[in-house]
Image: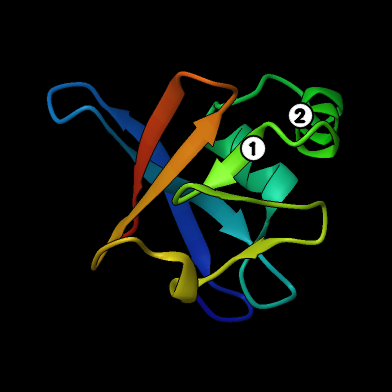
């Protein structure tokens, strides 16, 4: 993902994967709050900020902070990121 990249997120019911949504960025990567909202891991920016501040947000099983930006370096495999919110809520996000 580069500056100005547009990414898409939509639910792929049969595969159980989220595809990354259409987000235009002015910096490399996607901010963690916007990313969580795009893959519907949270419902609002406020909920995302609270979750991150309380230490309940993980990308590929690593706790993240408010300054985190999702980039190609965060991929767990060739095109998948594992998002965990709380103790048991997991999502697989697929980048194309």
58 sits to left or right of 72: right
Instruction: State which quadrant residue 69 falls in.
Output: bottom right
Q: Residue at x 47, y 75 (%)?
A: 73
Whether pointer 1 and pointer 2 mark residues with C-beta atoms closer than 8 Å, the reply is yes
- Image coords of residue 39 (percent x, y): 50, 35
Mark 1 → mark 2, Cα distance in angstroms? 6 Å
Quarter of the rendering occupied by the C terminus: bottom left
As rendered, which of 48 and 5 lies closer to the eye? Answer: 48
| Depicted 70 relative to depicted 60: above or below | below
As rendered, which of 87 and 66 lies closer to the eye? Answer: 87
Instruction: State which quadrant residue 27 falls in.
Output: bottom right
| SS type, badge 2 | helix
Q: Residue at x 47, y 66 (%)?
A: 74
Q: Residue at x 61, y 46 (%)?
A: 35
Closer to the N terminus: mark 1 or mark 2? 2
Q: Residue at x 57, y 43 (%)?
A: 58
9 sits to left or right of 22: left
Q: What residue sits right under mark 2 in the picture?
A: 51
77 sits to left or right of 58: left
Disc count in the image? 2
- Image coords of residue 8 (percent x, y): 43, 49
Q: What residue sits right under mark 1 in the picture?
A: 57
- Residue farthest toward the left in the current orientation of the protein: 14
| SS type, badge 1 | strand
- Image coords of residue 78 (percent x, y): 23, 68
Bin the neighbour count of mark 1 within 10 Å (Cα to Cα): few under 14, some 14-19, many 20 and up: many
| Depicted 31 relative to depicted 41: above or below | below
Disc number at residue 93?
Answer: none
Bin the neighbour count of mark 2 within 10 Å (Cα to Cα): few under 14, some 14-19, many 20 and up: some
């Amino acid at each position: 993902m580069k500056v100005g990249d547009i990414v898409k997120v939509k639910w792929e019911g049969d595969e159980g994967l989220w595809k990354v949504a259409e987000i235009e960025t002015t910096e490399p990567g996607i901010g963690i709050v916007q990313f969580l909202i795009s893959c519907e891991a949270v419902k609002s920016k406020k909920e995302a900020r609270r979750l991150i501040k309380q230490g309940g947000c993980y990308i590929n099983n690593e706790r993240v902070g408010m300054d985190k930006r999702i980039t190609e370096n965060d991929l767990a495999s060739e095109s998948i990121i594992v998002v965990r919110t709380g103790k048991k809520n997991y999502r697989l996000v697929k980048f194309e």
